[in-house]
Amino acid sequence: MYYLTKTIEISGAHRLELDYPSKCTAVHGHNWKITVYCRAKELDRNGMIVDFADIKRLIGDELDHKVLNDVLPCNPTAENLARWCCERIKGCYRVDVQESEGNVASYVVED
Ligand SMILES: [Zn+2]
């Protein structure tokens, strides 16, 4: 198997829809660190699992300096953001989303 990881840092705002009182329901921002994990049994004809530039374009460029509520079709929690990223990238099986230092959510595709 071939594996790659790429880490992207973006600045983005969000507000969460929660069924309990929280300051996170107000619009606020984070400097997000998103790590994408991809794998493939076979490389494509260019010798890649996926082009690092495609990951930057499909995740970094889509999210950087955006209000994540306007981009994601769901409540933009770190967990939902991890899944959204994973589903956009060829060969992706895991995404870690660090919302702030020490707060990380992961989405992992089960085999
Ligand atoms: Zn937040």
Image: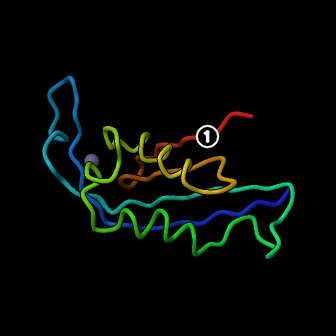
When asked about the image quadrant of residue 21, the answer is top left
For the residue with label 1, is its CB less than 8 Å from the closest atom of ligand 1?
A: no
Disc 1: CA contacts within 10 A as few (<14), some (14-19) or many (>=20): some
Q: Which residue is mark 1?
A: 108
Residue 69, given in percent of the width and then of the height, sits at: 26, 48
Q: Does 57 sit above or below residue 88?
A: below
Q: Residue at x 13, y 44 (%)?
A: 26
The amino acid sitting under disc 1 is Val
Foreground: 9 or 48? 48
Give coordinates of residue 35: x percent, y percent: 55, 58
Looking at the rendering, which quadrant does residue 73 occupy?
A: top left
The x, y position of residue 97, in whole percent, is 46, 51
The percent position of residue 66, horizontal first and vertical second, equals 27, 63
Q: Is residue 91 left or right of residue 46?
A: left
Image quadrant in which the N terminus is located: bottom right
Above/below status of 110 relative to 12? above
Q: Quadrant for the C terminus, please.
A: top right
